[in-house]
Image: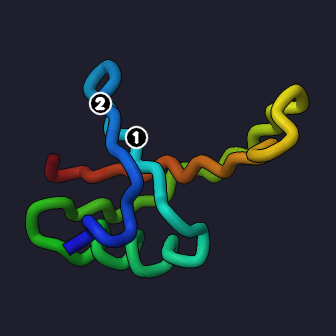
Amino acid sequence: MLNKYIKKIKIKKGEYHLYLRDYNDIEKVTFFLKNNIICQFKILIDICGIDYIQNKKNRFEINYNLLSIKY
């Protein structure tokens, strides 16, 4: 379902890192992660902004930290 929205997935120290193809798809992806029976990410812990000052092309990044109580 999410393959058309996600560019790559990394698993690091038990955490999933999803990289989206287009930032406009964040609403669709978070809706899926919240409402899908397998995921159930019910809590948005925080939102972090990162500035990669040396990188001119993709300088800014936003991280959404979600929590699934069940999983």
Residue 39 picture quarter? bottom left
Residue occupied by mark 1 = 17
Colouring rule applied to residues: rainbow
Q: Residue 26: give x, y in percent of width and height.
A: 51, 71
Q: Amino acid at mark 2?
A: Ile
Cα gap from disc 2 to disc 1, whole angstroms: 6 Å
For the point 75% across and 39% down, which residue is it? 50
Q: Residues within 10 Å of mark 1 (few under 14, many from 20)?
A: some
Q: Residue 70: give x, y in percent of width and height.
A: 15, 52
The foreground one among 28 and 9 is 9
Residue contact at pointers 2 and 1, CB within 8 angstroms: yes
Q: Residues within 10 Å of mark 2 (few under 14, many from 20)?
A: few
- Earlier in the chain: of badge 2 and badge 1, it is 2
Secondary element type, mark 2: strand
Residue occupied by mark 2 = 11
Q: Judge whether 67 appears above or below 13 on screen.
A: below
The foreground one among 37 and 21 is 21
